[in-house]
């Protein structure tokens, strides 16, 4: 039997993107609305779709911003769960 690699579709729904980031779909819609997360509307009902690469770009940018904030002393980098909950 041949193992077939699992292929993921190029685009995901806001709910799928929310699952990837462990947030609620409303947070994804807010990111789309502010332009922080690139997305497109398709179909007659204007359903939102997020490209996998766009989500990866958003994640990379979030890591970059977080590293800058840590370097600037805006975020404690001591693993303090209490400090993390205030973010």
Image (tube, grey):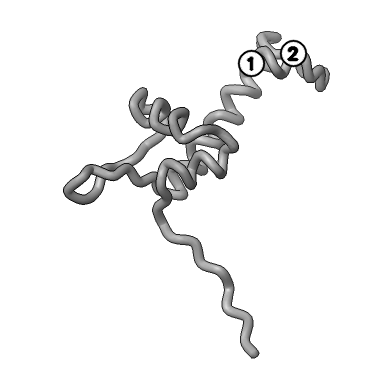
Q: Quadrant of the N terminus?
A: bottom right
Splitting the image into 4 quarters, where does residue 38 fall? top left
Residue 22, x across and y down, in percent: 59, 37
**Distance of mark 1 from mark 2, alpha carbons?**
7 Å
Q: Nearer the viewer, residue 46 or 60?
A: 46
Q: Nearer the viewer, residue 75 or 87?
A: 87
| Dot label at residue 83 | 2
Q: Tell me the residue at 55%/36% (across/down).
A: 60
* Horizontal side of residue 29 vs 76, given as left or right: left
Mark seen at residue 14: none
Residue 79 drawn at (x, y percent): 81, 22
Write down the residue under mark 1: 87
Residue under the image location 55 percent in, 33 percent down: 23
Q: Is residue 82 left or right of residue 43?
A: right
Q: Residue at x 40, y 53 (%)?
A: 11
> Helix, strand or loop at disc 2?
helix
CB of mark 1 within 8 Å of CB of mark 2?
yes
Residue 50, placed above or below residue 66: below
Q: Name the spot of residue 64 as percent of width and height, x first.
A: 59, 28
Estimate how packed mark 1 is, as few (under 14), some (14 to 19) or many (20 or more) residues with alpha carbons within 10 Å. Answer: few
């Amino acid at each position: 039997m041949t193992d077939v690699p699992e292929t993921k579709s190029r685009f995901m729904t806001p709910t799928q993107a929310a699952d990837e980031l462990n947030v609620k779909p409303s947070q994804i819609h807010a990111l789309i609305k502010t332009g922080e997360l690139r997305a497109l509307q398709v179909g007659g009902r204007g359903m939102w779709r997020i490209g996998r690469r766009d989500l990866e770009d958003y994640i990379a940018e979030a890591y970059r911003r977080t590293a800058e904030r840590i370097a600037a002393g805006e975020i404690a980098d001591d693993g303090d769960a209490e400090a993390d909950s205030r973010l």
